[in-house]
Every structure is written in C-alpha cells, then in structure tokens.
Image: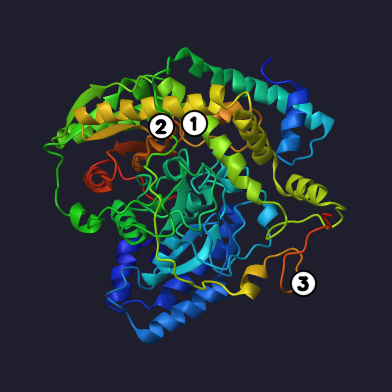
Amino acid sequence: MSDLTQLTLSEVRAKLADKTLTALDVTEAALARIQATEPTVQALLSVQAEEARARAKALDAQGPDAAKPLWGVPLVVKDVLCTKDAPTTCGSKILENFRPVYDATAVARLKDAGAIILAKANMDEFAMGSTTENSAYFATKNPWDTSRVPGGSSGGSGATVAACQCFGALGTDTGGSIRLPASFCGIVGLKPTYGRVSRFGMVAYGSSLDQIGPMTRTVEDAARLLQVIAGHDERDSTSVNTPVPDYVAGLAQSNDLKGLTIGLPEEYWDKGLSSEVAEACAAAIKQAEALGAKTVPVRLKLSEYAIATYYIIAVAEASSNLARFDGVRYGHRDHDAQSLIEMYVKSRTQGFGEEVQRRIILGTYVLSSGYYDAYYRKAAQVRRLIRQDFEAALTQCDVIMGPVCPTTAFKVGEMTADPLQMYLMDIFTISTNLAGLPGMSLPVGLGRDSGMPVGLQLTGRAFDEARLLQVAGVLERNVPATGLPSL
Amino acid sequence: MKISPEEVAKVARLARLDLSPEKIDQYAGQLDGILGYMDKLSELDTSSVEPMYSPVDHVSVMRDDVVRKDYAREDILKNAPETDGSFFIVPRIV
C-alpha cells in the first residue's frame, strides 16, 4: 500500500498546506488506491475521476488557501447526498440516471472548504438496511474480511475510509447508519445532534431522525469534517441556529478524563453481548477510569421499546417521503403505461427494491385511517418518554457509554432472510436518533474471537459534540490501536 | 393475525405499488410478525404523554418576499423522463 493514502485527513491537510504534496499528487494516489482495491471492496457506486483531477489542478494553480480548512483533501460522500451533475442514486434503480441540479448543503460546504469529491459511496437502498447488502447495485465488502459485511446503511462510506481510498467520508444516520459501519470497519463515526447539520439535499428517509455526519480514521479528522458541515442553513428549517464551537481546538484541551462522569446503562451491558464485544468495551471503560473518569450506573428503562418505536416512526416517515418518486419529474418511468395511475404504479414497482417496498407498505399501514392512533401516535408518545429517559440519565453523567452493536461484523448473507432479525441489530443505536442526541462510534480494538474491529458508543447531551470528540480523542490515544486492514 | 393478505393488497394499492399474489402472501406473513412485535408498545400507559414528532420545535421561518431565481427551467427539466422543453409530460389524464 502506498504510504500517502494511509495518512490521516489531518496529516494530509498539513502536507497540502505546506506544499509538501500537491492536490493532484494526493488525488492521483487516492484514485490509484481506488483502482487497486475497489474490485475487492466495492465501496463506490460512481467515481468522479476526471472531475476530481480537474478540480485538483485548478486548486494547485491557485495554491494553498489557509482560509479553506479542507484545501485539496479528497473525500467521498454517501450516494444519498445530492452532488451537482454527478450521479445520486441512493443505491436504488429508481434514481439510476438522476443527476441533481444542486449540491446538498453539507457537500457544498465541503467544496467551499476546498475539498475534492472523489466518489459516491454505496449504501443500502434509500438507507434502509444494516449491511449494505440492500443496495440495488452490489453489496460492499468489509475491508477487514471480505466474507463479512461492512455494516450499513453507510457501508460504502465506512469501507472506503477503512480501505484508505480517501481521507474521510460523509455518511448519514437514521437509526445507526453511521455508527454501525464505523464500528464494523474500525473507524470513527459521528452522528451529530438532530439539527446540527443541514439536511438540505439529503434524500430523506426518516426526516425526524436523519442526520449527516463524518466517518474518518481518527477523532481529529472527524472534528475537522464536522467543523465544516455543522451550522444553521436557511434551507433546512430543522437546522438549529446555535453556535458551532471550535471542535479541533477543544481536542487539544485535555490529556486525561479527570472530572468526567460516564454513565453505564445496565440495559446496554447486560443484554446478549458477544463476549469479545463485552470484553473490548469493558477494557475501554477501565482505561477511561484509569484516566480519571468516574463511572456510574444509569438506567434507560425504555430501551426494550426502542426498536418497535423506531420502526413505526421510520417507516411512516419513509412512506410519506418516498411518495415523491412518481416517474414525473425525475427517476425511473415506465413508458408503456396508458394512464397516469398505471404510470405511477409501474414506475414505483419496477424502481423500488424489496426492502423499500416492504417499509413503504408498513409505513402506509401504520399511518392509515384506523391504525394511526394505535401505531404512529403511540410511537410518538413513547418517543417522548425515551427522550426523557436519556435526559434523566444525562443529568447523572456527562456521557453514556456502551457497545455500538452486540457483535462484530457478521458474515455476508447471514441477516438477509428475516427482516425483523436485522432490525434487532440496531438495538443500541436507534434510541439516540429517537432522542435526537449526538452519538459516536470509536474503535477500541479487535475482537478476540473474530479479529474484527469493535466500536464503543458514546452518547452525549444535545449539541455537546465537542465533549464527545474530546473524550473520544483522549480514549483513542489510550486504547489498543485498531490499525488498518491489510488489503 | 394482525394483517391479512387482503389488507396488504389494499395498502399496496394506496402506496401505488403492484404486488404479485405470492409477494402479498409473503409480505403479509412478514408484516404480521413485525406488527406483532410492535404491539409491545401497548404495555406502556401513554395516556397523558404529548406525542413527540420531532426532536426540534418547528418554527415557521419568515423570509422577505423577494423574487429569486435559483434554477433555470432547462436545468429543472433535465432529469424529466418526458418533457416538451417547457413542461413535464405525463400520460393523458382527461
């Protein structure tokens, strides 16, 4: 492997700034790495090689710009984020030929910061899935072991970062879709507080749950990406107008965890954890204690209701959001249909994959007359109770910690038969989205049995990403290094 | 039985999806299991709980009523499956 592609985002950024490397050097190295590893990993739905080269040359012609914090850095974005004139398929056949006429705000902010968008990352169709096997195009493989899944739905983003095809990526997280692939691929993933990052130009799945966030090889890299994409956007009325702190400066502030109180929910530590996940996460907590943190038991009593609550709300919102795919303005159309209704029905039936259709039907059902109160309204009430649970726990501690997932990455094909079984893998991550809180996955070593990465989950108070990053930054330097997969 | 094949067929029609009889039976079985699992929520008394539909309070944002042209017509029509250059074309309605 070429050393250049193994640099962290922060390292490559410094070498670009002092002209040790040119934007074109870095872009060519990343493209060569993509060419070498992509046949095995299959993380990317499209590669914008020529556009990236042209952009790198244009940047080099102007020279490094200190006002642009990601100047010359090649990145990848999940294919659910609109990229002007570049394919944006959402992993679905229904958007196979779609070329957005605008950039998502998060993408526009990366570009304004000087970043080079290299490619669009594979994903479960419309972000519905936990393995990236639900992509309508192909399944992404885990770079650590290609017989295993990378997690999902941002599995392409997780795999491309772990495989060193780029220096960082954007993912999206509706119920764990950043944190799970980050955990399975041994990288850092941060789902910001709901409202921290504009969702404008992100093709919606569950609008009250979705957030865009960074997926990177280090905590500092995640801080740098979040710094650029965070902040109010007048085009998303749910993006909150609250100040964005200096995340990178915050990282340098401490070398220990003195004064920090960590909450350990018994609901997350007792339930059916694989022994290797329990062991690696417990070792990280022990390390946190050695660094001066205090741990306290907390309760999240409603955890057992979270999956039912989540899947009612997510599918209800999905069925409404996906109604826009009607074959009229963009996307697949059946050209033989004789009537408008027939055109809608045939275009949607041909364009959507099985899991998407299943969730649309379930969502339509829970919103339909006679069932709305029993399912959707009920779930929204339980959602408030779940948030209150978290708020109460977070008065007793600063950060909640637990595993991201009960197991390390599972084998390809293991979870495809029974949809409910796959929904249950999200048990530790979905509550964070229901409550709207920030959550992070930090690699804390390799599992003793599988040799696969284990992720520790950190959940914080609303808009307290700075503390999550700071705590994760200290832990990162003190837990066993996960390293990079040998590809 | 939470959901019958007939109900799945009805909901699919509402959602503008066309399912084969085999798919309807398969989905009915799977959705029945999922809805059965979701019934767990009825264990909780939520009679006095205000529903939470979003983590943030939605405030209607007012902007000055100024004309702004963000996109050209030809750009917006670029992705249309069928267009006459000015409009989106759909199968005849009336």
Q: Are marks 3 and 2 in contact (CB under 8 Å)?
A: no
Q: Are marks 3 and 1 in contact (CB under 8 Å)?
A: no
Q: Estimate the x, y position of residue A193 in percent, counting from the top left.
A: 35, 45
Residue on which disc 1 sits: A310
Q: Residue A131: which disc?
A: none
Q: Are marks 1 and 2 in contact (CB under 8 Å)?
A: yes
**In the depicted view, which residue is nearer to us: A346 or A276?**
A346
Image quarter of residue B93: bottom right
Q: Amino acid at mark 1?
A: Tyr
Image quarter of residue A209: top left
Q: Is residue A305 above or below residue A50?
A: above
Q: Is residue A1 visible?
A: no
Residue on which disc 2 sits: A431
Q: Residue B84: which disc?
A: 3
Mark 3 belongs to which subunit?
Answer: B
What is the distance, in whole Å, between disc 3 and disc 2 at their CAs? 48 Å
